[in-house]
Image (cartoon, helix red, strand yellow):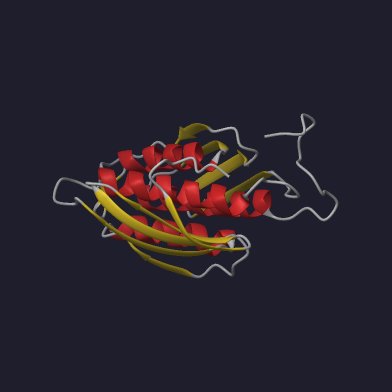
Amino acid sequence: MTTPLGSLDVVDREGRRVTVRRSTRETDITLTVDLDGTGTADIETGVGFFDHLLGSLAHHGLLDLTVRATGDLHVDDHHTVEDVALVLGAAVAEALGDRAGIVRFGDASVPMDEAVASAILDVGGRPYAVIDLPFRGERAGTLTLQNVEHALEAFARTSGTTLHLRGTGRNDHHLAEAAFKALGRALRAATSPDPRRTGLASTKGST
């Protein structure tokens, strides 16, 4: 298939496990995702709380995820967070292939103490994002919280996902983590094989 991210190189592919790399003047990222994994995560982006969020997504989505990213963190965390999300989305799109024989839609709600987040998504190839995560502060650790919404939008764009993700909470850490856990669980449901379907889950017969 045509990669949704022009500068992406597919390094390896086996079933729904792909390794991709993207190198620019701002970031250098190598990422492996296995949609049929067990939730194992090995992530190093240089932004600790973002690593934590991606690890939560992998664990609760039961996808294996390895990320090695270096970026211009001397500027700020924007390029690194955005580009990792872009590459993750593109890798998921590559792993899904023609998107035939999957459930396609998924939803999940996850509480974390006083916070709760709900993710509803369609991985059918139509990129769109509606994100409403009302953070109170500017940062969680070294992660600029404004970049969380931007990362989720980037992931939706390159993965070909319609994503609606909303949450509430008083603690920014809890709200962000609940959001990524919900996204992981919804992604797991949507990308799961549907034993009753052989083609695309679309009345049009195409994505």
Q: Quarter of the image holding residue 78?
A: top left
Q: Looking at the image, which residue is at 46% across and 43% down?
A: 155
Q: Looking at the image, which residue is at 62% across and 42% down?
A: 123
**Where is residue 172 drawn, in percent x and y?**
36, 47
State whether residue 167 appears in this view. Answer: no
- Residue furthest to the right: 196
Q: Looking at the image, which residue is at 80% across and 31% down?
A: 203
**Where is residue 107 drawn, in percent x and y?**
64, 45
Quadrant holding the N terminus:
top right
Q: Is residue 150 left or right of residue 18?
A: left
Count how many numbered circles sit on residues in the image. 0
Q: Is residue 31 left or right of residue 93?
A: left
The answer to whether 125 is drawn above or below residue 189 in the figure is above
Name the one closer to the observer, 73 or 1.
1
**Where is residue 182 drawn, in percent x and y?**
55, 50
Name the one closer to the observer, 151 or 196.
196
**Where is residue 145 drawn, in percent x and y?**
31, 43
- Residue furthest to the left: 74
Q: Is residue 118 left or right of residue 137?
A: right
The answer to whether 156 is drawn above or below residue 190 in the figure is above
Q: Looking at the image, which residue is at 44% across and 44% down?
A: 169
Quadrant holding the C terminus:
top right
State whether residue 28 appears in this view. Answer: yes
The answer to whether 138 is drawn above or below residue 49 in the figure is above
